[in-house]
């Protein structure tokens, strides 16, 4: 079946966004990683662009590392070191832009204002919830990641604003922990207990 002009326009737009996003991440990641392995007489170094492309493909598709080994002509063992390395670099350069916890009362007030306007929920400073992700049982972990549904999982606790933008993420807690247990140990709880939000104005409203 032939695609109409609108469908083709959507495809072109998606490809353009992917390309621009890839180039942006490549530039940021290259800036972060100033020193890469140099070319030698025996082999060429793996460029930042190749490392980034491989990592994004792995994250987007979930392909096995054996499959990526054939596609990129990079050894399985090296892929296993590239992926976490690039993920760490991306997190380091993007977290302050795309996952920044408000640090001033005015920034928190802006979050509350957006919730009030978009969701009719006044004085809300974020939506907080936990999510459990299936994982392959880590070696020598016993029952540490085994949860109440009889699966091995890690837990993510996340705070988002009214536009679904992440403000805070705590990930990696063992599956056997309860949501209350994860909250009890997370930095956000400590932040709130230190009364960091004492200067925020609470606008009381009445429907009567």
Image: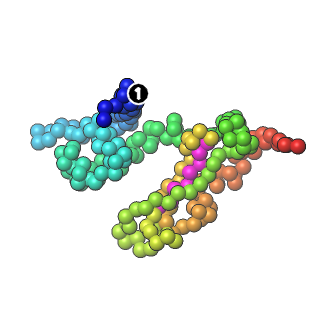
Find numbered disc 1 in the image and state the secondary structure of the residue it sits on. helix
Answer left or right for 24 relative to 132: left
**Residue 118, picture quadrant:** top right
Task: Tell me what residue is drawn at x 37 percent, y 36 percent.
Answer: 29
The segment highlighted magenta reads: 154-161
Identify the residue under disc 1: 6
Answer left or right for 38 relative to 107: left
In this orientation, does residue 199 appear?
no
Residue nearest the viewer, comparing 191 with 152: 152
> Where 150 falls versus 160 (above or below)?
below
Residue at the far left in the pictured view:
41
Identify the image quadrant of the C terminus.
Answer: top right
Task: Tell me what residue is drawn at x 44 percent, y 69 percent.
Answer: 151
In this orientation, does residue 176 appear?
yes
Residue at the far front in the pictured view:
1
> Where 97 falls versus 180 (above or below)?
above
Q: Is residue 94 magenta?
A: no
Give x and y (percent) for residue 32.
38, 36
Residue nearest the viewer, comparing 147 with 174: 147
Identify the image quadrant of the N terminus.
Answer: top left
Magenta portion: prevailing SS class: strand
Task: Tell me what residue is drawn at x 17 percent, y 38 percent.
Answer: 44
**Residue 39, picture quadrant:** top left
Residue at the far bottom in the pictured view:
142
Give x and y (percent) for residue 188.
61, 52
Q: Does the magenta stretch include residue 158?
A: yes
Residue nearest the viewer, comparing 161 with 1: 1
Task: Tell me what residue is drawn at x 72 percent, y 49 percent.
Answer: 195
**Residue 110, picture quadrant:** top right
Give x and y (percent) for residue 111.
66, 38
> Where 204 falls versus 131 (above or below)?
above
């Amino acid at each position: 079946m032939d695609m109409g002009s609108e469908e083709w326009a959507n495809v072109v737009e998606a490809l353009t966004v992917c390309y621009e996003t890839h180039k942006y991440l490549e530039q940021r990641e290259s800036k972060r990683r100033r020193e890469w392995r140099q070319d030698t007489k025996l082999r060429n170094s793996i460029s930042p662009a190749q490392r980034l492309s491989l990592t994004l493909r792995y994250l987007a598709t979930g392909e096995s590392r054996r499959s990526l080994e054939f596609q990129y002509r990079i050894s399985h063992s090296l892929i296993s070191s590239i992926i976490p390395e690039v993920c760490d670099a991306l997190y380091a350069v993007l977290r302050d832009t795309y996952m920044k916890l408000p640090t001033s009362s005015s920034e928190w007030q802006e979050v509350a204002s957006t919730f009030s306007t978009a969701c009719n929920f006044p004085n809300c400073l974020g939506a907080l919830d936990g999510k459990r992700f299936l994982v392959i049982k880590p070696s020598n972990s016993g029952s540490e990641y085994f949860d109440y549904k009889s699966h091995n999982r890690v837990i993510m606790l996340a705070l988002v604003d009214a536009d679904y933008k992440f403000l805070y993420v705590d990930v990696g807690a063992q599956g056997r922990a309860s949501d209350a247990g994860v909250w009890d140990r997370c930095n956000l709880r400590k932040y709130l207990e230190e009364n960091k939000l004492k200067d925020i104005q609470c606008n009381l409203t009445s429907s009567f």
